[in-house]
Amino acid sequence: MSHHIVILGSGFAACTAVKTLRKQGFQGDISLVAPRPELFYFPSLIWVPSGQRKYEDLAVPLHRFLEKNRVEYIQSSVTGLLAEEKTVVLEDDKTLSYDAVIIATGGRYIRKLPGIENACIACSGWQDTKAFSDKLAAMNEGTIAFGFAGNPKEPSAMRGGPVFEFLFGVDTLLRKQGRRDKFKLVFFSPAPTPGKRLGEKAVDRLLGEMKKRDIQTYLGKKMKSFSDSAVETEGAKFDADLILFIPGMTGPAWAANSGLTLSEGGFFQANEFCQVEGQDHVFVAGDAGSFPGPEWKPKQAHMADLQAEAAAKNALEAIQFKPPAHRFKTELICIVDTLSNASMVYRDPKRSFMLKMPPLHWAKVMFEKVYLKEYR
Protein backbone atom coordinates (compact mmCIF):
# COMPACT_ATOMS: atom_id res chain seq x y z
CA MET A 1 0.00 0.00 0.00
CA SER A 2 1.40 3.40 -1.01
CA HIS A 3 1.12 6.17 1.54
CA HIS A 4 0.17 9.72 0.60
CA ILE A 5 1.67 12.81 2.27
CA VAL A 6 0.24 16.22 1.45
CA ILE A 7 2.24 19.44 1.85
CA LEU A 8 0.38 22.74 1.97
CA GLY A 9 2.41 25.68 0.65
CA SER A 10 5.42 26.27 -1.59
CA GLY A 11 7.75 28.32 0.60
CA PHE A 12 10.86 27.45 2.57
CA ALA A 13 9.18 24.97 4.92
CA ALA A 14 7.25 23.24 2.14
CA CYS A 15 10.30 22.75 -0.09
CA THR A 16 12.44 21.53 2.80
CA ALA A 17 9.71 19.05 3.76
CA VAL A 18 9.77 17.64 0.21
CA LYS A 19 13.56 17.25 0.26
CA THR A 20 13.52 15.67 3.71
CA LEU A 21 10.86 13.10 2.83
CA ARG A 22 12.81 11.91 -0.20
CA LYS A 23 16.15 11.97 1.62
CA GLN A 24 14.60 9.78 4.31
CA GLY A 25 13.74 7.22 1.64
CA PHE A 26 10.01 7.84 1.39
CA GLN A 27 8.82 6.28 -1.87
CA GLY A 28 5.13 7.04 -1.51
CA ASP A 29 3.06 9.80 -3.07
CA ILE A 30 3.66 13.46 -2.28
CA SER A 31 1.22 16.21 -3.26
CA LEU A 32 2.02 19.89 -2.90
CA VAL A 33 -0.84 22.39 -2.83
CA ALA A 34 -0.15 26.08 -3.54
CA PRO A 35 -1.59 28.94 -5.61
CA ARG A 36 1.66 29.14 -7.62
CA PRO A 37 4.45 26.59 -8.18
CA GLU A 38 7.22 28.93 -7.05
CA LEU A 39 9.51 29.62 -4.14
CA PHE A 40 9.85 33.32 -3.38
CA TYR A 41 13.13 34.25 -1.70
CA PHE A 42 11.94 36.92 0.75
CA PRO A 43 15.31 37.55 2.50
CA SER A 44 16.74 39.28 -0.59
CA LEU A 45 13.94 41.84 -0.89
CA ILE A 46 16.28 44.13 1.07
CA TRP A 47 18.35 44.56 -2.11
CA VAL A 48 15.45 45.72 -4.29
CA PRO A 49 15.74 49.47 -3.44
CA SER A 50 19.38 49.47 -4.56
CA GLY A 51 18.44 47.76 -7.85
CA GLN A 52 20.45 44.64 -7.03
CA ARG A 53 17.47 42.29 -7.30
CA LYS A 54 14.64 41.97 -9.80
CA TYR A 55 11.48 39.90 -9.56
CA GLU A 56 12.91 37.04 -11.61
CA ASP A 57 15.88 36.86 -9.21
CA LEU A 58 13.58 36.14 -6.28
CA ALA A 59 10.65 34.17 -7.70
CA VAL A 60 11.97 30.69 -8.49
CA PRO A 61 9.72 28.33 -10.52
CA LEU A 62 9.54 24.90 -8.89
CA HIS A 63 8.51 22.75 -11.86
CA ARG A 64 11.93 21.12 -12.21
CA PHE A 65 12.34 20.60 -8.47
CA LEU A 66 8.90 19.03 -8.11
CA GLU A 67 9.41 16.78 -11.12
CA LYS A 68 12.81 15.65 -9.84
CA ASN A 69 11.30 14.72 -6.47
CA ARG A 70 8.22 13.09 -8.02
CA VAL A 71 5.78 15.54 -6.45
CA GLU A 72 2.25 16.10 -7.74
CA TYR A 73 1.55 19.82 -7.90
CA ILE A 74 -2.04 20.92 -7.26
CA GLN A 75 -2.75 24.56 -8.09
CA SER A 76 -5.22 25.69 -5.47
CA SER A 77 -5.62 27.45 -2.13
CA VAL A 78 -6.50 25.71 1.11
CA THR A 79 -9.84 26.66 2.66
CA GLY A 80 -10.13 24.15 5.50
CA LEU A 81 -9.21 20.78 6.92
CA LEU A 82 -11.21 17.80 8.17
CA ALA A 83 -8.80 16.05 10.50
CA GLU A 84 -11.05 13.12 11.41
CA GLU A 85 -11.52 12.30 7.73
CA LYS A 86 -7.83 13.04 6.95
CA THR A 87 -8.96 15.43 4.23
CA VAL A 88 -7.87 18.88 3.09
CA VAL A 89 -10.57 21.19 1.72
CA LEU A 90 -9.52 23.21 -1.33
CA GLU A 91 -11.10 25.92 -3.48
CA ASP A 92 -14.42 25.12 -5.15
CA ASP A 93 -15.12 22.58 -2.35
CA LYS A 94 -12.63 20.13 -3.79
CA THR A 95 -11.03 17.75 -1.33
CA LEU A 96 -7.74 15.89 -1.03
CA SER A 97 -7.18 12.92 1.26
CA TYR A 98 -3.91 12.19 3.05
CA ASP A 99 -2.17 9.80 5.37
CA ALA A 100 -0.24 12.71 6.87
CA VAL A 101 -0.30 16.43 6.13
CA ILE A 102 2.30 19.15 6.69
CA ILE A 103 0.95 22.69 6.96
CA ALA A 104 3.43 25.19 5.51
CA THR A 105 1.14 27.89 4.15
CA GLY A 106 2.83 30.69 6.09
CA GLY A 107 1.26 33.41 8.19
CA ARG A 108 -0.38 36.78 7.54
CA TYR A 109 0.50 40.31 8.50
CA ILE A 110 -2.05 42.03 10.73
CA ARG A 111 -3.36 45.03 8.79
CA LYS A 112 -5.74 46.57 11.34
CA LEU A 113 -4.02 49.89 12.03
CA PRO A 114 -6.02 52.83 10.63
CA GLY A 115 -4.42 54.09 7.43
CA ILE A 116 -2.11 51.09 7.04
CA GLU A 117 -2.74 51.24 3.30
CA ASN A 118 -0.41 54.25 3.32
CA ALA A 119 2.53 52.08 4.40
CA CYS A 120 4.53 49.73 2.22
CA ILE A 121 4.45 46.36 4.00
CA ALA A 122 7.97 45.10 3.46
CA CYS A 123 8.38 41.33 3.15
CA SER A 124 4.74 40.85 2.22
CA GLY A 125 5.95 40.20 -1.30
CA TRP A 126 7.28 41.85 -4.42
CA GLN A 127 4.65 44.52 -5.03
CA ASP A 128 4.95 46.47 -1.77
CA THR A 129 8.74 46.37 -1.79
CA LYS A 130 8.89 47.48 -5.44
CA ALA A 131 6.39 50.26 -4.71
CA PHE A 132 8.60 51.50 -1.87
CA SER A 133 11.67 51.34 -4.12
CA ASP A 134 10.00 53.26 -6.94
CA LYS A 135 8.75 55.99 -4.60
CA LEU A 136 12.20 56.30 -3.03
CA ALA A 137 13.85 56.65 -6.44
CA ALA A 138 11.37 59.40 -7.42
CA MET A 139 11.94 61.45 -4.24
CA ASN A 140 14.34 64.40 -4.21
CA GLU A 141 14.00 65.03 -0.48
CA GLY A 142 11.77 64.22 2.47
CA THR A 143 11.29 62.02 5.51
CA ILE A 144 11.34 58.23 5.28
CA ALA A 145 9.99 56.23 8.22
CA PHE A 146 10.86 52.61 8.98
CA GLY A 147 9.16 50.53 11.67
CA PHE A 148 7.77 47.24 12.86
CA ALA A 149 5.30 45.97 15.44
CA GLY A 150 4.21 42.65 16.92
CA ASN A 151 1.16 40.58 17.79
CA PRO A 152 0.26 41.35 21.43
CA LYS A 153 -1.25 37.88 21.76
CA GLU A 154 1.86 36.16 20.34
CA PRO A 155 5.06 38.06 21.24
CA SER A 156 7.27 35.93 18.97
CA ALA A 157 5.11 36.70 15.92
CA MET A 158 7.09 39.64 14.63
CA ARG A 159 9.66 40.17 11.93
CA GLY A 160 11.93 43.10 12.73
CA GLY A 161 15.28 42.08 11.23
CA PRO A 162 14.43 43.05 7.64
CA VAL A 163 13.35 46.54 8.77
CA PHE A 164 16.83 47.17 10.20
CA GLU A 165 18.29 46.01 6.88
CA PHE A 166 16.03 48.26 4.82
CA LEU A 167 16.80 51.17 7.14
CA PHE A 168 20.58 50.81 7.05
CA GLY A 169 20.53 49.84 3.38
CA VAL A 170 18.60 52.96 2.34
CA ASP A 171 20.92 55.11 4.45
CA THR A 172 23.94 53.57 2.70
CA LEU A 173 22.29 53.92 -0.73
CA LEU A 174 21.49 57.60 -0.22
CA ARG A 175 25.06 58.27 0.93
CA LYS A 176 26.45 56.51 -2.15
CA GLN A 177 24.16 58.67 -4.30
CA GLY A 178 25.40 61.80 -2.53
CA ARG A 179 21.94 62.89 -1.36
CA ARG A 180 21.64 61.64 2.22
CA ASP A 181 21.64 65.25 3.50
CA LYS A 182 18.34 65.87 1.73
CA PHE A 183 16.53 63.12 3.65
CA LYS A 184 15.52 62.54 7.25
CA LEU A 185 15.38 58.89 8.28
CA VAL A 186 13.21 57.82 11.21
CA PHE A 187 12.88 54.48 12.97
CA PHE A 188 9.82 53.69 15.10
CA SER A 189 8.57 50.73 17.12
CA PRO A 190 6.17 50.20 20.01
CA ALA A 191 8.91 48.08 21.61
CA PRO A 192 11.16 50.07 23.98
CA THR A 193 14.10 47.81 23.08
CA PRO A 194 13.50 46.82 19.44
CA GLY A 195 15.44 43.78 18.31
CA LYS A 196 15.62 42.40 21.84
CA ARG A 197 15.27 38.85 20.56
CA LEU A 198 18.65 39.27 18.92
CA GLY A 199 20.14 39.81 22.37
CA GLU A 200 20.76 42.78 24.67
CA LYS A 201 24.13 43.60 23.10
CA ALA A 202 22.56 43.52 19.64
CA VAL A 203 19.95 46.10 20.68
CA ASP A 204 22.64 48.45 21.96
CA ARG A 205 24.64 48.06 18.75
CA LEU A 206 21.61 48.59 16.50
CA LEU A 207 20.52 51.74 18.32
CA GLY A 208 24.14 52.91 18.42
CA GLU A 209 24.37 52.44 14.65
CA MET A 210 21.21 54.51 14.19
CA LYS A 211 22.67 57.32 16.29
CA LYS A 212 25.90 57.16 14.30
CA ARG A 213 23.95 57.43 11.05
CA ASP A 214 21.80 60.33 12.33
CA ILE A 215 18.60 58.27 12.32
CA GLN A 216 15.92 59.59 14.68
CA THR A 217 14.02 57.07 16.83
CA TYR A 218 10.53 56.91 18.33
CA LEU A 219 10.35 53.91 20.66
CA GLY A 220 8.11 52.32 23.27
CA LYS A 221 4.80 53.92 22.29
CA LYS A 222 1.77 52.08 20.94
CA MET A 223 0.98 52.64 17.28
CA LYS A 224 -2.17 54.65 16.51
CA SER A 225 -2.37 55.32 12.77
CA PHE A 226 -0.74 56.12 9.45
CA SER A 227 -1.62 58.75 6.89
CA ASP A 228 -0.13 59.69 3.54
CA SER A 229 2.13 62.18 5.31
CA ALA A 230 2.57 61.07 8.92
CA VAL A 231 2.95 58.32 11.50
CA GLU A 232 1.11 58.68 14.79
CA THR A 233 1.87 56.87 18.04
CA GLU A 234 0.46 57.44 21.52
CA GLY A 235 3.56 59.49 22.32
CA ALA A 236 4.18 61.45 19.16
CA LYS A 237 3.11 62.26 15.64
CA PHE A 238 5.81 62.85 13.05
CA ASP A 239 5.94 63.62 9.34
CA ALA A 240 6.63 60.81 6.90
CA ASP A 241 6.63 61.16 3.13
CA LEU A 242 7.33 57.44 2.68
CA ILE A 243 6.64 54.64 5.17
CA LEU A 244 8.03 51.12 5.26
CA PHE A 245 6.43 48.97 7.94
CA ILE A 246 6.18 45.32 9.00
CA PRO A 247 3.20 44.68 11.30
CA GLY A 248 2.84 41.74 13.65
CA MET A 249 1.84 38.37 12.28
CA THR A 250 -1.03 35.92 12.74
CA GLY A 251 -1.92 32.57 11.22
CA PRO A 252 -3.31 31.94 7.70
CA ALA A 253 -6.88 33.00 7.00
CA TRP A 254 -8.07 29.41 6.56
CA ALA A 255 -6.93 28.43 10.09
CA ALA A 256 -10.31 29.47 11.50
CA ASN A 257 -12.00 26.85 9.29
CA SER A 258 -9.54 24.08 10.07
CA GLY A 259 -11.08 22.75 13.27
CA LEU A 260 -7.53 22.51 14.62
CA THR A 261 -6.25 23.91 17.90
CA LEU A 262 -5.05 27.48 17.50
CA SER A 263 -2.85 29.60 19.73
CA GLU A 264 -4.14 32.84 21.21
CA GLY A 265 -2.35 34.67 18.41
CA GLY A 266 -4.18 32.70 15.69
CA PHE A 267 -1.50 30.16 14.72
CA PHE A 268 -1.71 26.37 14.63
CA GLN A 269 -0.63 25.24 18.09
CA ALA A 270 2.28 22.81 17.80
CA ASN A 271 4.39 20.74 20.18
CA GLU A 272 8.15 20.20 20.13
CA PHE A 273 7.66 17.61 17.36
CA CYS A 274 5.85 20.10 15.07
CA GLN A 275 2.72 18.07 15.63
CA VAL A 276 -0.49 20.09 15.80
CA GLU A 277 -1.96 19.74 19.27
CA GLY A 278 -4.40 16.83 19.52
CA GLN A 279 -3.59 15.44 16.07
CA ASP A 280 -1.52 12.37 15.22
CA HIS A 281 -1.20 12.98 11.47
CA VAL A 282 -1.19 16.77 11.17
CA PHE A 283 2.08 18.72 11.35
CA VAL A 284 3.04 22.36 10.90
CA ALA A 285 6.29 24.17 10.06
CA GLY A 286 7.24 27.80 9.55
CA ASP A 287 5.17 30.94 10.00
CA ALA A 288 1.82 29.11 10.21
CA GLY A 289 2.65 27.55 13.57
CA SER A 290 3.02 28.53 17.20
CA PHE A 291 5.84 26.52 18.73
CA PRO A 292 7.26 25.94 22.20
CA GLY A 293 10.63 27.45 22.98
CA PRO A 294 12.39 30.45 24.46
CA GLU A 295 10.87 33.92 24.35
CA TRP A 296 13.31 34.99 21.63
CA LYS A 297 12.43 32.18 19.21
CA PRO A 298 12.37 33.67 15.71
CA LYS A 299 10.03 33.52 12.77
CA GLN A 300 12.49 33.31 9.90
CA ALA A 301 13.33 31.06 6.95
CA HIS A 302 16.07 29.23 8.86
CA MET A 303 13.66 28.19 11.62
CA ALA A 304 11.09 27.17 9.00
CA ASP A 305 13.68 24.83 7.49
CA LEU A 306 14.56 23.29 10.88
CA GLN A 307 10.89 22.79 11.74
CA ALA A 308 10.14 21.32 8.31
CA GLU A 309 12.84 18.69 8.72
CA ALA A 310 11.35 17.61 12.05
CA ALA A 311 7.78 17.72 10.70
CA ALA A 312 8.66 15.57 7.68
CA LYS A 313 10.50 12.97 9.77
CA ASN A 314 7.64 12.79 12.25
CA ALA A 315 5.10 12.51 9.43
CA LEU A 316 6.95 9.38 8.33
CA GLU A 317 6.71 8.05 11.89
CA ALA A 318 2.98 8.82 11.92
CA ILE A 319 2.12 6.88 8.78
CA GLN A 320 3.79 3.87 10.42
CA PHE A 321 1.70 4.47 13.55
CA LYS A 322 4.78 5.29 15.60
CA PRO A 323 5.02 8.19 18.07
CA PRO A 324 6.98 11.28 16.96
CA ALA A 325 10.67 11.13 17.82
CA HIS A 326 12.26 14.16 16.13
CA ARG A 327 12.47 17.58 17.80
CA PHE A 328 13.45 20.76 16.01
CA LYS A 329 16.34 22.93 17.11
CA THR A 330 15.61 26.52 18.11
CA GLU A 331 18.31 28.66 16.56
CA LEU A 332 18.47 32.26 15.41
CA ILE A 333 20.90 33.13 12.64
CA CYS A 334 20.54 36.58 11.16
CA ILE A 335 22.89 38.59 8.95
CA VAL A 336 21.85 42.25 9.18
CA ASP A 337 23.06 43.68 5.88
CA THR A 338 23.79 47.36 5.11
CA LEU A 339 24.76 46.97 1.40
CA SER A 340 28.45 47.50 2.13
CA ASN A 341 28.82 45.82 5.50
CA ALA A 342 26.97 43.31 7.65
CA SER A 343 26.60 41.99 11.18
CA MET A 344 25.81 38.39 12.02
CA VAL A 345 23.71 37.61 15.07
CA TYR A 346 23.63 34.06 16.40
CA ARG A 347 21.57 32.73 19.28
CA ASP A 348 20.61 29.33 20.64
CA PRO A 349 19.54 28.24 24.15
CA LYS A 350 23.16 28.11 25.31
CA ARG A 351 24.91 31.07 23.73
CA SER A 352 24.61 34.22 21.67
CA PHE A 353 27.05 36.50 19.90
CA MET A 354 27.28 39.22 17.26
CA LEU A 355 30.00 39.77 14.66
CA LYS A 356 30.44 42.72 12.29
CA MET A 357 32.65 42.66 9.20
CA PRO A 358 32.36 43.46 5.46
CA PRO A 359 32.81 39.82 4.30
CA LEU A 360 29.49 38.93 5.93
CA HIS A 361 27.72 40.96 3.23
CA TRP A 362 29.20 38.67 0.59
CA ALA A 363 28.46 35.63 2.76
CA LYS A 364 24.77 36.58 2.63
CA VAL A 365 24.93 37.02 -1.14
CA MET A 366 26.65 33.66 -1.55
CA PHE A 367 24.17 31.89 0.73
CA GLU A 368 21.30 33.04 -1.49
CA LYS A 369 22.98 31.54 -4.55
CA VAL A 370 23.78 28.25 -2.84
CA TYR A 371 20.35 27.93 -1.24
CA LEU A 372 18.45 28.51 -4.48
CA LYS A 373 20.73 26.47 -6.73
CA GLU A 374 18.85 23.19 -6.32
CA TYR A 375 15.53 24.86 -7.06
CA ARG A 376 16.51 26.65 -10.25
Image (tube, grey):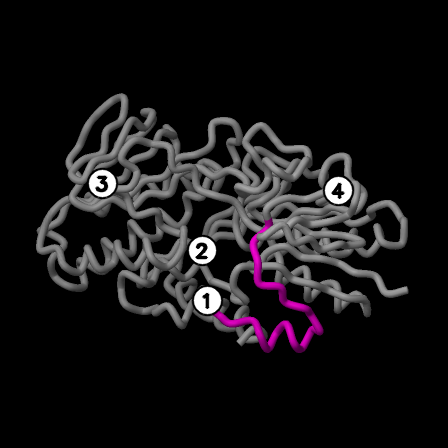
What's the magenta region? Answer: 60-78
Q: Which residue is mark 2?
A: 335
Measured in 3D between alpha carbons, the distance from the residue under mark 4 to the one under mark 2, in whole angstroms, is 39 Å
Give yes or no for contact between labels 2 and 1 (Cβ–Cβ under 8 Å). yes
Can you tell which of label 3 and label 2 is closer to the viewer? 3
Tell whether 53 sits left or right of 93: left
Earlier residue among tags 4 and 2: 4
User: How many neighbours does mark 2 have within 10 angstroms: few (below 14), some (14-19), or many (20 or more)?
Assistant: many
Residue at (71, 40) in percent of width and height:
276
Residue at (11, 47) in percent of width and height:
142
User: How many neighbours does mark 3 have within 10 angstroms: few (below 14), some (14-19), or many (20 or more)?
Assistant: many
**Amino acid type, callout 1:** Ala
Question: Residue 281 versus residue 89: which sits nearer the camera?
Answer: 89
- Residue 8, above or below 19: above
Specify the quadrant that holds the N terminus: bottom right
Q: Secondary structure at mark 1?
A: helix
Tell whether 222 sits left or right of 202: left
Earlier residue among tags 4 and 1: 4
Measured in 3D between alpha carbons, the distance from the residue under mark 3 to the one under mark 4, in whole angstroms, is 47 Å
Tell whether 168 sits left or right of 297: left
User: How many neighbours does mark 1 have within 10 angstroms: few (below 14), some (14-19), or many (20 or more)?
Assistant: few
Number of dots carrying numbers: 4
**Amino acid type, callout 4:** Ala
**Amino acid type, callout 2:** Ile
| Image spot of residue 52 (x, y percent) | 32, 69
Q: Which residue is mark 1?
A: 363
Earlier residue among tags 2 and 1: 2
| Image spot of residue 39 (x, y percent) | 52, 64
Q: Residue furthest front?
A: 92
